[in-house]
Amino acid sequence: MCARRSCLRKGIITLLILLFISLLGSAFYFRDRLWLVIKYFESGEQSPIALEKERDPQYSPINLEVRAAEAYQYAQAHDFDLEHAILIDYGRHSGKNRFFVWNFVENRVEIASLVAHGYGNKGFESSNQAITFSNTPNSYASSLGKYRIGARAPSQWGINIHYKMHGLEPTNDKAFERYIVLHSFEMIPEEEQYPAYLPMGFSQGCPVIDNSTMRQVDQLLQRKEKPVLLWAYYLE
């Protein structure tokens, strides 16, 4: 009888140890997904610190027309499309539009939307008040600089289409290797959220826009014969 109880006790202990190991393994395997969930539930409310930053002249958004003129000069010098470029101003409040399709011919914004920035892996964490940019693989951070928009391909997110992005500068030249692509996600709102922020957790470094905007951008890009320039910048 005692031997039987001893065996039963050993069996229970062994089962608990195996369960503990299994839980540890699952936590390690799904660590990125768990981190994304945590980031998603971060508050979207604006903080007093953020309000102070927006009143500070150094946080004033860069004039789009000025940046578009610089983008046109680059596009002209590097044989890019001369009708449109995509400008992403990460210096703007994430609850406001900061993704812009600029029409060079009419000198105006043709499409505008919200865009998510990378939430950042450990050591590269971002918030809505302080964005960390990196070109490091597995950093899950957004990268600044000019990109050539590449091939159209299937996606598991949003409208199930994404566009490859090829970084053209030292700050983003690992974009293709990092699988940084332009895509959409159904949880990105179509309207501005200001003064609330766009919740973190939607991006692991890719510029992520809403589905409706992605459909418009997709139609525009499919008509292009020359590559389109995408320029992501921040307080430059």
Image (spheres, grey):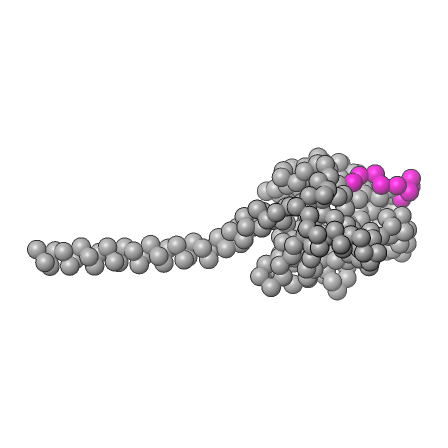
In which quadrant of the rendered view does residue 102 lie? top right
What percent of the width, then of the height, locates residue 154?
Answer: 63, 42
Residue 130, image quadrant: bottom right
Q: Quadrant of the N terminus?
A: bottom left
Q: Measuring from the top left, give residue 158's x and y in whole percent.
A: 63, 39
Res. 37 visible in picture:
yes
* Residue name at image x 29 percent, y 56 percent: 16
Residue furthest front as drawn: 48
Q: Is residue 34 left or right of residue 20?
A: right
Q: Camera-side residue: 203 or 159? A: 203
Is residue 67 covered in magenta?
no
Residue 111 is inside the magenta segment = yes
Q: Quadrant of the C terminus?
A: bottom right
Q: For the point 74% across and 62% down, which residue is it? A: 171
Q: Is residue 161 visible?
A: no
The mark tally for this picture is: 0
Residue displayed at 68% across by 60% down: 132
130 or 201: nearer the eye? Answer: 130
Q: Position of residue 169 (x, y in %)?
A: 77, 62
Does residue 5 appear left or right of residue 38 in this picture?
left
Question: Observer-nearest residue: 164 or 99?
Answer: 99
Viewer-proximal residue among 165 and 111: 111
Report the span colored magenta: 104-112
Residue at point 74% right, 51% down?
51
Q: Position of residue 179 (x, y in %)?
A: 64, 54
